[in-house]
Image: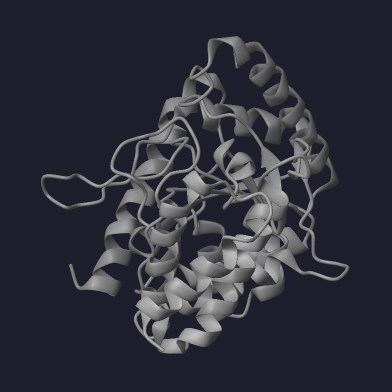
Amino acid sequence: MTVVEGTKLVVQGIKDVEGIPEEMLPGLEHFITEYLTATSSTGIPSAIQRITTCLKLGAAHGLGPSKYTFETSHTALRSGPFDYYAFGNDFFRPCVDPTSSFVGGVDNLKQAMSQIEAGDNVVFLANHQSEADPQVVSLMLESVGYAEEASKITFLAGHKVTTDPLAIPFSMGRNLLCIHSKKHIDSDPTQKDFKQKQNLKTMGSMLEMLKIGSRCLWVAPSGGRDRRNVETGDVPIAGFDSKTIDMFRLMARKSKKECHFYPFSMVSYDVCPPPDSVEAGVGELRNVRYGPVGVWVGEETKNEGGLEARHKFCENAEEECEKNYRLLRKEIYGE
């Protein structure tokens, strides 16, 4: 079976799925073709099965009156008839070239995991490249023996991944703290007050989590995904927001638990490239590619000093993330 034939088969099948509006079909057809092309090496029939499951879950939980609603703190749905965490990993696994992918800073990763086991908290300060980043993190940590630990990571999630119909099933399989990033909090002035109150509630949930200890958080201090330079084709990492990092340092201090911060570099752009411009709404056109990915855990950035040290802390974390991002790209692409 060819990709074209497979796409037609899936499109025909979802036309009868309750809840999918006709205006969504062109975008879904593009997504189907992209996914079947990227994962064709695993066999078109198995790829059809995965993409069909994805679309049916998106319709069931992302559209209509039964749309899944996320609380400010969400625990991955893994028990019962369906494991949403495994679904997400298995969906993107065929998109990743394992032979060319790379995990760097394994000694730092090992140290972080030991600190978590000892009862301390760990925060990964990451650049963010694609919607598949949580799955990429899991697949890469799994490849170096930390599959169980990866499943326990809590991700700071923006509004898109909890409101976009296609993203919702993947988000249901993740431990999340749901927050509105500064890039999108002003997109609708009528909702600004509501979003700010939600963010305060999320901060409260985070503090309670950190007080317990043995927690691992992943956050993108830039507040969004890295974007391609359309003139050069390069994908520079987006700058870290010092206020976001200040907030995490403050929560760490309030928790009265030891908290360790590690720059966490990611190369995942090509697997699921975002649009070149930032869009406030949901329903973006999905592109999917087959290729290598990678993560690199940098040296711990010491959480020392008060307000006077906040800019230096942010600069150090961003510089370490940037440095290791370049090393990661060199390992993967030879750049």
Which residue in the rendered view is the most extreme toward the right?
A: 80
- Residue 130, how many percent across, how many down? 43, 54
Q: How is the image coloured?
A: one colour
Residue at 50% over, 59% down: 132
Compared with residue 116, is residue 61 higher up or lower down, i.e. above or below?
Answer: above
Relative depth, front residue between 251 and 24 = 24
**The N terminus - image quarter:** bottom left
Is 38 on the left-hand or right-hand side of 132? left
Relative depth, front residue between 202 and 10 = 10
Any part of residue 138 in sight: no
Any part of residue 73 in sight: yes
Is 276 on the left-hand or right-hand side of 171? left
**The C terminus - image quarter:** bottom left
Relative depth, front residue between 156 and 320 = 156
Relative depth, front residue between 302 and 8 = 8
- Residue 309, how many percent across, how many down? 48, 26
Compared with residue 226, is residue 81 higher up or lower down, i.e. above or below?
Answer: below
Is 59 on the left-hand or right-hand side of 302? right
Residue at 39% over, 64% down: 288
Q: How many marks?
A: 0
Compared with residue 10, is residue 23 higher up or lower down, i.e. above or below?
Answer: above
| Quadrant housing residue 246 | top right
- Residue 269, how many percent across, how many down? 35, 58
Residue at 17% over, 45% down: 230
- Residue 15, how many percent across, how many down? 57, 60
